[in-house]
Amino acid sequence: MRQVRVKLEANEHDIECDLLFTAASVPHREPPNIMHDDGHLIMHTSRFTQLGYWEGYFSIDGERTEVKKAYAIRDKSWGVRPVGEPQGGAPGLLNDEPGVYWVWNPVNWGDVCTQMGTFEDRDGHPTQVSADLLPLYANPQDIPEGEEPGITKMTEVKHKLSWNKGTRLASGGEMNFSDKNGNNYDYTLEPLQKFHMLGIGYNHFEWGHAYWKGELETGREEWNLDEINPLDYQFIHTHQVVRATMGDKVGMGTLETIVIGRHEPSGFKDFFDGAE
């Protein structure tokens, strides 16, 4: 898993690419995501996250963009997740207050990377939280096999996000980590560019994950981002490219957020109300 090539040849959708991911870290496995509903296990997934760089090109409608050692973060999850076609039988009773709060933030600091993720309940109490610091490698052949021996696990993980008015899109954030030796890792996040997860199937009503479309079906869809409703269920799940600042260190990373339902620390009171 030191290199992964993604190639899409000419097709009727006028989208092409030939991109090579070269790893700079181990594929680091995060804690499993486990959720129940009325006694039913509805989520039990594992995921690894790996940092690296992209090289190559992509082309849309004939407009070609060259990619030269662009920051790259890839992840892969597997297991049980409440997506796709619903299971048969009686539905869950939904005794618990519905909603989800998820924040995920891997950052490339040049020589090391930090990886953080958390689920919280409606009152802001973490139901899952973790953060780790891992070394980065200039030569992918130096990346060790298996888990990273140089990992630093955080024993305290806190975060605070701000939100763009009238949306659930983060406008910035603060991360505060501590390791077992008392070292602190405090940094701020500045969003630079957003990406709607709808584009890769999350919350998509037709091309959502685990919907059977046949052996080989492709499609192309476009949205005018100036006209969408940012509180629409389909557009509320986002990734943002962020600049991270920790003292005199500057890093680049991803901030993933999805908040549906009430979340007391964020000031969200309803299912889809925006920030005040």
Image (cartoon, helix red, strand yellow):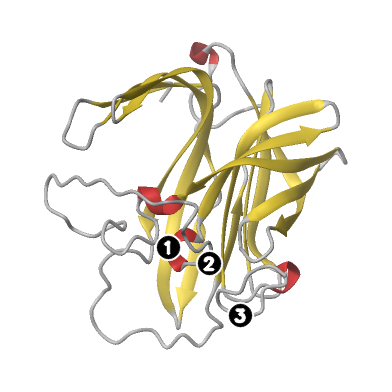
Image coordinates of residue 184 in percent, x first then y, are 85, 40
What whole-number distance in Å separates the C-alpha atoms at marks 2 and 3?
Answer: 12 Å
At a point 56% along the width and 77% down the height, the residue shown is: 271
Give the structural element (helix, strand or loop) at label 2.
loop
Q: Which amino acid type is marked by label 1?
A: Gln
Residue 163: where, in percent of width, then height? Answer: 69, 59
Residue 62 is situated, as x and y percent measured from the top left of the image, at 29, 25
In the rendered view, would you say 254 is above or below 257? above
Say if residue 106 shows up in the picture. no
- Measuring from the top left, give residue 10's x and y in whole percent: 19, 26
Per the image, the residue denoted by label 3 is 270
Q: Residue furthest left?
A: 215
Label 3, label 1: how many angstroms apart (C-alpha)?
17 Å
Residue 7 shown left or right of residue 118 in the figure: left
Image quadrant occupied by the N terminus: top left
Residue denoted by label 1: 234
For marks 2 and 3, the one nearer the N-term is 2
Q: Residue at x 62, y 22 (%)?
A: 136
| Crowding at mark 1 (Cα within 10 Å: few <14, some 14-19, many 20+) | some
